[in-house]
Image (cartoon, rainbow, N blue to C red):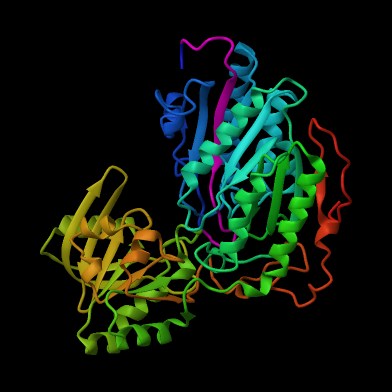
Amino acid sequence: MGGMPDSLPRIAVCGISLEASTFSPALTTAEMLAPRWGEDVLAAWEFWRPGGSLAHRAEWIGILQARSIAGGPIPAHDYDALKAEILGGLARAHAERPLDGVLLDLHGAAAVVGMDDMEGDLALAVRRVVGPDTLLSTGMDLHGNVSRTLAETLDLLTTYRTAPHVDWQETKERAAANLVDRLALPVGRRRPAKAWVPVPILLPGEMTSTRQEPAARLYARVPGIEALDGVLDAGIWIGYPWADEPRNMAVVMVTGDDADLVLEQAVALASELWEAREEFGFAAPVGQLDDVLAEALASTARPFFVSDSGDNPTAGGAGDVTWTLARLLESRALRDSGLRAIYASIPDASAAQEGARTGVGGTVDLVVGARVDDRPAPPVRVTGTVTAVERSEDNLEVVVATESVDVVVSAVRRPYHLESDFTRLGLDARRADLVVVKIGYLEPELFEMAAGWRMALTPGGVDQDLARLGHRRIQRPMFPLDADVDAVDIPGRAVLLAGDTGGARAPDALG
C-alpha cells in the first residue's frame, strides 16, 4: 500500500490456515491451500482495504497467505516450500524497513506429515526472521490448539467466540486492531502478560456448540473478562479432537497489563470449563445411521436433515467416504416410503466429468467415491438421470436422480452449508423430504431450514466416537477418554508468561 507515511507502523500479513485430521488418509497439498501473495493477501479482508476501519492505521504488507477448508495433513515438502516463501518475504520487507508487527493467519489445527505443532514451528521461524522487537498477533479458530510454544512465541492471541463461527471476520479484525493498538504504546509497554492454562478436555465441535450449554454460558463469560481494567483479551480454545498430537486439548488464555488479574481470570475460567466437562453433549440427538433413517422416514417434519458426521469435509474428513450413501441407495424402506432424499455430496472428479459429458437428461451408471478414503466402504454405483450440471471456476457438480436419492457428485470436495448450494443445482432443499449432508452441527442457514434434524454417528476420519479412532500420542489422562481425571489440578497447570509489565511465572505441570 504505497504512499503511507513513515510514522505508521509497518505490519506484514502472512500465514497458513488449515484444520487437518491425522486420522484421515487425505493430504492437503500446497496447491490445495490456494496461496495468494502481496495485494491479493490484503484483498481478502475488508478492514484494511481503502475506507476500512484499520486501513490508515498501519502500512499493511501482504506476504503470503495459504488457507483451505479442512482436510488431511500437509506433506512436509509442501509446508517447507510455503514456509520458505513466507520467511523470504518477511526478510525482504524487514530489510527494506524494519517491521513493527506481523499478523499471522492461523487456524490452530494444521498438521504436517512428520511434525507436531505446525503453528508453533511457523511462529518460531517468523520470530527468528523479524527479531524480538516485532509484535506478533493472530486470530484463531476456537477449534485450534495453543501449544505452550505458540503461547510463548506470539505476543497477542485471540479466538472465535461462536460455533458455528459467525464471528470469524470480527475475530480477524480484533487480532489486527489489538496489534495496532499495542504498537501505539511506547516501547517497553507493548507486550501484555499472558496466562496460558491447558485443560485436559478433548471433545468434537458437535458437542461444544455455543448454541447450547455449557459452551453458551462459558463463552458468554469472555466479553466480561475482556472488559476488566487491566485485561486486553480472553479466549477459550476448545481444541481439535481429530489429530493425535500432544498439543490437542482445550486451552484458556487471558492477556493484559495486570499480570495478577490475567492469571486469576484465566484460572477461574479454565476451572469453570473443567467443572462443566460432564455437561457437554451433542448439538442434536444422535444415533446410528439405521435408527436415524428410520426416525426420519417415520417423521412428518419436512425437510428432515441428517448429518453424515464421520466424513465431514469441513472438519477434516476426506469427503469421499461412501458408507452412508451406499446405505441410502440400498434402503428398501426409503424406496417403499415414496419419499426422496438429497445427498450432498460425494466428490469424484472422473464421475463428475462423465456425468457432465452425458449431459442433462441423459442416463448414467457411475462408480463414485472412496478414491481417497476406502476404509469404511468401497466405491458405490450410482445409476440414474442427470438433472443438473453446474460448472464453476474451481469445481464441477452433477446431480444424478436415482430411484429415491438425488445424488450430488462433485469434482472437488466442498461443503453444502447454504440454501443456494442446493438451489443452483435445481434442488429445493426447503421442500425436500430428507436431506443428508456431510456435516456435523448444521450451519445457520440449514439449521433455520430444518424442521427435523438428527446426527448420524458414521465412520470416517472425523468420527464423532473418538474412542474408535485410537489416540496414542495425546497427553493423558484426557476427558472423556480416560476415567482417572478427577485428580487433575487446573490451577497447578497455569503458566504466566510475563509481558512488559512483569510478573512471575506460575508453576506448571507440563514442563
Residue 282 appears in the picture as rendered = yes
Q: Is residue 496 left or right of residue 311?
A: right
Nearer the observer, 424 or 111:
424
Residue 109, image x, y percentages = 60, 51
Whether residue 229 is in magenta: the answer is no
In the orientation shown, which residue stands out farthest toward the front?
A: 229
| Position of 271 relative to 28 (above/below) | below
State the count of labels. Answer: 0
Nearer the observer, 324 or 156:
156
At horizontal 63% and vertical 50% (from top left) the residue drawn is 224
Residue 347, image x, y percentages = 35, 60
Q: Is residue 388 left or right of residue 440?
A: left
In the orientation shown, which residue stands out farthest toward the left?
A: 361
Q: Taken as a whole, is the magenta stretch helix, strand or loop?
A: loop
At horizontal 66% and vertical 65% (from top left) the residue drawn is 202
Magenta-tinted stretch: 3-25
| Position of 454 relative to 88 (above/below) | below
Whether residue 24 is in magenta: the answer is yes
Rendering quarter of residue 346? bottom left
Rendering quarter of residue 275? bottom right
Residue 155, image x, y percentages = 70, 35
At horizontal 62% and vertical 28% (from top left) the residue drawn is 181
| Position of 354 relative to 432 (above/below) | above
Rendering quarter of residue 230? top right
Residue 193, image x, y percentages = 77, 38
